[in-house]
């Protein structure tokens, strides 16, 4: 655990990274029991989100929540962050995993994604990355959820260029 509260955060920390992975299809599992999110290649029934990598790009999966302990300024309270990040040649995707059947999960996921983006851009220069997306994935609502254009534009503006998708399928382009 990071006890130095002012220490810079490394979102690309090797201890929290899996890869390179070039499989065409894999899943993300978050057991919700304090363990970090991780990839899985066999048991689709446990997947919270599906990664489709049809071009077999080399991707890296980075656990964030329960792997990077990011503390609020001058506090022992942890920041609210998303579960994971996928990076590849010209892309960076942030992923928040939910399992709620009731409403309100989209707003909570968006808040966690936005906070993670704020912390990430404070720690790293990601301005040269071409494809930046934020995914709110819910195992109980796997299909695409339509967001109003104004809501998507507002998220894009607030996060300096991250596009928001609400679906449980993460497509690597």
Image: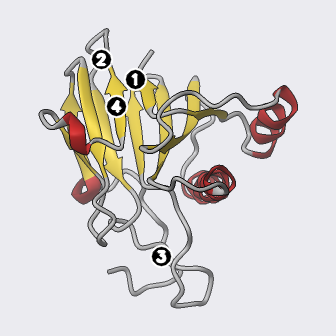
Place of residue 35 in the rendered image (x, y in percent of width and height, measured from the top left): 26, 67
Place of residue 137 in the rendered image (x, y in percent of width and height, measured from the top left): 49, 42
Q: Is residue 74 above or below residue 118?
A: below
Q: Is residue 21 above or below residue 123?
A: above
Q: Nearer the viewer, mark 2 or mark 3?
A: 2
Residue shown at 43%/28% (left/top)?
169
Q: Secondary structure at mark 2?
A: loop
Q: Is residue 2 above or below residue 112?
A: below
Q: Residue 57: which numbered mark, if any?
A: 2
* 14 and 164: which is toward the camera: 164
Question: Which of disc 1 and disc 2 is earlier in sequence?
Answer: 2
Label 4: few (<14), some (14–19) or many (≥20) C-alpha neighbours in 10 Å: many
| Residue that numbered label 1 is attached to | 89
Place of residue 21 in the rendered image (x, y in percent of width and height, measured from the top left): 20, 29
Gap between marks 2 and 1, in whole Å?
8 Å
Q: Secondary structure at mark 4?
A: strand
Q: Secondary structure at mark 1?
A: loop
| Residue that numbered label 3 is attached to | 7
Q: Are marks 2 and 1 in contact (CB under 8 Å)?
A: yes
Quadrant of the image containing the C terminus:
top left
């Amino acid at each position: 655990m990071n006890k130095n509260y002012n220490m810079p955060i490394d979102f690309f920390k090797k201890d929290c990274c899996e890869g390179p992975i070039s499989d065409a299809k894999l899943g993300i599992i978050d057991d919700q029991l304090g363990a970090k999110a991780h990839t899985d290649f066999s048991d689709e029934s446990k997947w919270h989100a599906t990664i489709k990598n049809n071009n077999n790009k080399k991707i890296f999966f980075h656990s964030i929540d329960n792997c990077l302990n990011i503390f609020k300024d001058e506090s022992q309270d942890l920041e609210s962050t998303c579960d994971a990040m996928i990076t590849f040649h010209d892309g960076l995707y942030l992923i928040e995993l939910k399992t709620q059947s009731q409403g309100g999960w989209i707003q909570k996921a968006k808040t966690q994604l936005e906070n993670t983006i704020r912390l990430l851009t404070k720690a790293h220069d990601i301005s040269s990355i071409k494809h930046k997306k934020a995914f709110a994935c819910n195992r109980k609502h796997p299909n695409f959820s339509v967001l109003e254009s104004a809501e998507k534009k507002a998220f894009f503006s607030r996060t300096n260029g991250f596009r928001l998708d609400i679906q449980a399928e993460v497509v690597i382009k």
